[in-house]
Amino acid sequence: MKRRTFLKYLCQASAGIYLCQISEFAQAQEAARAVEEKDLKDYLHRMANFDKQQPGDIILSQKEQALLRSTLGRLRRVQRTVGFGNFCVVSFDDILKFGRNYSSVGRFTKPELEFMDHIFHFDAHKYGFYGEKPEKKLTAAFPRKELVKIPRTGNFLYRGEPHRKYLEIRKELGKNVYLTSGVRGIPKQFILFLSKAESNGGNLSLASRSLAPPGYSYHGVGDFDVGEKGLGAANFSASFARTNTCIKLREHGYLQLRYPENNMLGVRFEPWHIKV
């Protein structure tokens, strides 16, 4: 074969391979886009139905659910002993002390302690919760001098920016708005998260779509929730977004939401949650 003919053949063959590679790459890109679109649709479907069991949810076994119930029962007994408001700011070490010192509570058993340790250190991304974890230590505690109790709410706020922002909201919106949830320690987040899982057959993924797992809540570092008087439990639903209180919060620039509508954090829309 002549050199010129050989080079022409080689160029044609190389061009064919290159075009084939481009075609394969384009097909791969198209397939990737199709997968991404399907994943997004699946994600949005899960979030639109956040309170229903979904394929792939992490659900505790019957044995683990029994352990969940015994742990939750003991946490609730501590809560009744110290009072609901004070329980919001007790530490993990505090609840162990109450368990040892009050027969009405009883010591936390080794399996209960191991269960709480596992839940706290479990990677919540596996639930489908993609938020950050601002509290890394199970035994994290609040210095009481840094907290201020808000009258007639049973809740605490951090002094400084969180307290100042709440007072500004009250000044702008009036007495119709009030604090529904302030500072939450690790034990308080355990009760909220595990209670949601217990009422849904041990489904931890479902619980995480409504409540941050222990350690992942920004209530431990300054965020707080507000509601409208007279609305009751609906303050923690999408109905709050249609209230005059929420509309005014938006108008005055207070709704820099931690979990906005259609967020990609695996958490339902929370128009009541004030980001600090």
Image: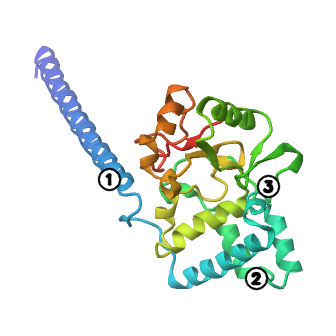
Dot 3 amino acid type = Ala
Label 1 secondary element: helix
The reply to whether discs 3 and 2 touch (Cβ–Cβ < 8 Å) is no
Which residue carries the number 3 mark? Answer: 140
How far is the residue under mark 1 from the one under mark 3?
36 Å
What is the distance, in whole Å, between disc 3 and disc 2 at their CAs?
Answer: 21 Å
Task: Report the quarter where the C terminus lies.
Answer: top right
The colour mode here is: rainbow
Q: Secondary structure at mark 2?
A: loop
Q: Residue at x 68, y 37 (%)?
A: 166
Say left or right for 106 vs 35: right
Residue 263 shows up from this direction: no
For badge 1, the amino acid type reads His
The residues tagged by marks 2 and 1 sit, at their Cα atoms, a distance apart of: 40 Å
* Residue 88 image-quadrant placement: bottom right
Query: Which secondary structure lies at badge 3?
Result: loop
Residue placed furthest toward the top: 4
* N-term-proximal mark, 2 vs 1: 1
Q: Amino acid at mark 2?
A: Thr
> Which residue position holds label 1?
45
Badge 3: how crowded within 10 Å, few (<14), some, or many (20+)?
A: some
Per the rendering, the mark at residue 192 is none
Categorize mark 1 by other alpha carbons within 10 Å: few (<14), some (14-19), many (20+): few
Q: Nearer the viewer, residue 97 or 27?
A: 97
Residue picked out by circle 2: 109
Q: Earlier in the sequence, mark 3 or mark 2?
A: 2
255 left or right of 36?
right
Which comes before the other along the chain, label 1 or label 3? 1
Does residue 7 lie above or below 238 as drawn?
above
The answer to whether mark 1 and mark 3 are in CB contact below 8 A is no
